[in-house]
Amino acid sequence: MTENPHLDTTAITAGRRGARGLSADIATSTVWSSEGLDATHDEIVRGRRGKAYSRYTNPTVRQFEEAIAELEGADDALAFGSGMGAIATVVFALCSPGDHIVAQQQLYGGTLALLAGPARRMGIDVTFVDATVPGAFATAAKKPRTMLVIAETPANPALALADLDEVGSIGGPFTLVDSTFATPMCQQPLRHGVNISLHSATKAIGGHNDALIGVIAGETDIIDAVWAHSVLHGAAASPYDAHNALRGVRTLAVRQERQCSTAHSLAEWFSSQDACTAVHYPGLASHPQHELAARQMTAFGSMLAVELPGGPEACTRFLQAVELARPATSLGGPETLVCHPASSTHHGLDPESLSASAAAEGLLRISVGLENPGDLIADFERALTKSRS
Ligand SMILES: Cc1ncc(COP(=O)(O)O)c(C=O)c1O
């Protein structure tokens, strides 16, 4: 085996080193029989390392977890039935009534809703901060009540960044970064001292819009503690989704290379268009946090956002005009998708949270797929023209 292989090489065998079958088997059984009472007891006591019941652990899911741990440089990883399953389980595993969370205000709408709703209802105090302000997380931390710091970078939907070194240096006790937009190919939060790296693997890691699955990676003690709660929370990952996501891992590096490169070209092209008032992409020198992006990311991701001067009406006309790109709310797959966050992923937020999350009324989020970049530009050129009429 090559020593210290590059990440794209690691991705090919991650989680499956030594397996003779080149595709993972799908372990469909929800339960395993044993030799008798004592043997069943032993498997249950071995918990995550036992083989008793699929909500505790499943061999296919385990391979996916091991693959992500390898890509993240983590001791271990834990998969869930969705990205939100991962976030909710971590929050309620680590926090109790009276504890405090410092969270970025620029977050995926579901995470914002969870923190502002159920978390506060359970007596967890949440302070939202602007991640683009240096020192904002540390300033808001209330020792010893702050139990969890939550960042998302690049953030959904307008690509604001959080400084990974800054988050990693907060003596938590726990720090979590939602790294969904970056994937392990573009940034590695744990290498900056962050405790938990989280992904909605439904997105680019799965990469084919056919797996709903979330995952966290970190040190064994933290993963074990979250696992103990997760078996009660019940947001277990399905082996079918884990199988699809594991297949996605194999091609993640090449897909990301192409998607990041097309996203960069599109961001430059949109920047040259009068019909666009703002373009948000961390790879552009005009992005206010470009230097930070260059410091902590190895590529700038496959997501960008553009603002149209005509507000929601112009966005509607744009979405009606695209023929190649499709109006849809997910991201990271082979098809280029465009969504209007204010009325979809961030719908239902109060006006203050909406504006703090930067989901402006005239903003469109674009998940760049694998199509030919020239064809995408032709599609967007037509849509921009229509957006003005
Ligand atoms: C950044 C981010 N985190 C988490 C989630 C939630 O993931 P899932 O849809 O897999 O629950 C999403 C969904 O869009 C997201 O964009």
Image (spheres, helix red, strand yellow):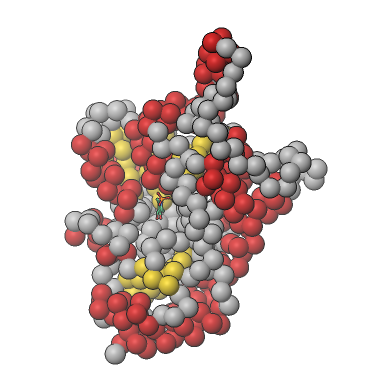
The residue positioned 66% from the left and 50% from the top of the image is 11
Q: Quadrant of residue 388?
A: bottom left
Q: Quadrant of the C terminus?
A: bottom left
Instruction: Please indicate, yes or no, whether residue 182 appears anywhere in the rendered image.
Output: no
Residue at 31% in and 81% down: 317
Most extreme residue toward the top is 38
255 shown above or below 237: below
Q: Give the mark count.
A: 0
* Residue for point 32% across, 68% down: 340
Seen as rendered, the residue at the extreme right is 1
Q: Residue 115 location in percent, x, y? A: 28, 43
Nearest to the observer: residue 20 or residue 180: 20
In the picture, measured across the screen, residue 350 lies left or right of residue 180, that is: left
For this rendering, which residue is in front, 227 or 221? Answer: 227
| Residue 346 at x, y percent in the picture | 29, 58
Q: Is residue 152 above or below residue 124?
A: below
Dividing the picture into quadrants, the one containing residue 330 is: bottom left
Judge whether 286 appears above or below 111 on screen. Answer: below
Measured from the top left, where is residue 252 in percent x and y? 61, 57
| 69 sits to left or right of 136 | right
Q: Position of residue 276 (x, y in %)?
A: 36, 81
User: Which quarter of the figure is the N terminus placed in?
Assistant: top right
Question: Viewer-proximal residue, 47 or 260?
Answer: 47
Observer able to see residue 132: yes
Residue found 25% across the figure and 78% down from its top? 313
Q: Looking at the image, is 325 positioned above or below residue 224?
A: below
